[in-house]
Image (cartoon, rainbow, N blue to C red):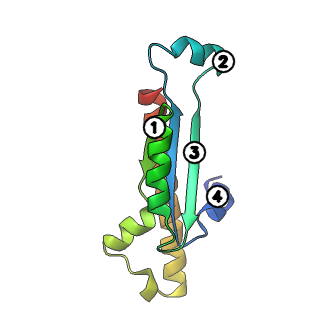
Amino acid sequence: SRCARLAATRARYAAAASSAVVAARCASADDETWVSAKLGTPRLHRIVVTGGPCAGKTTAMSKLSLRLQNMGFAVFVVPEIATLTITGGADPGRYTKQQHRDWEVAVLRLQLHLEDGFAEIAEKCAL
């Protein structure tokens, strides 16, 4: 069920903030035969970076993204929803316990939906 999925993935977002990268193996015309022969169908990989405020997530994501692109991967960096909601007006520091819980559940649902959307784009357009 949807609730079970949210509960099972909640641990991924336990830190104060998180970011995700979806990377798909990129096959150019020259290495398409090698990719299909050695790796089979191109696969989608998800990498999640978590940490508290000012822990270096954005810097790590930038370096990781560039490195993966240099290795021939198509990289999609998924925006982090908690920050988007806060810069958009949410103020979880002032919420009651129930409001904060409701905000976290909504953030998690949005984050998962956005990641799934990015994965769909990567699968259909980048592979």
2 above or below 37? below
Instruction: Report the Cα–Cα distance between label 4 and label 1.
Output: 27 Å
In percent of width and height, residue 41 lies at: 60, 21
Residue for badge 3: 46
First of labels 4, 1 by sequence position: 4
Q: Residue at x 43, y 53 (%)?
A: 62
Residue 38: mark: 2
In percent of width and height, residue 95 lies at: 45, 85
Which mark is nearer the camera, 3 or 4? 3
Check disc 1 and give the amino acid type.
Gln
Residue 124: mark: none
Residue 69: mark: 1
In percent of width and height, residue 83 lies at: 40, 68
Residue 9: mark: 4
Check disc 4 and give the amino acid type.
Thr
First of labels 2, 1 by sequence position: 2
Which mark is nearer the camera, 3 or 2? 2
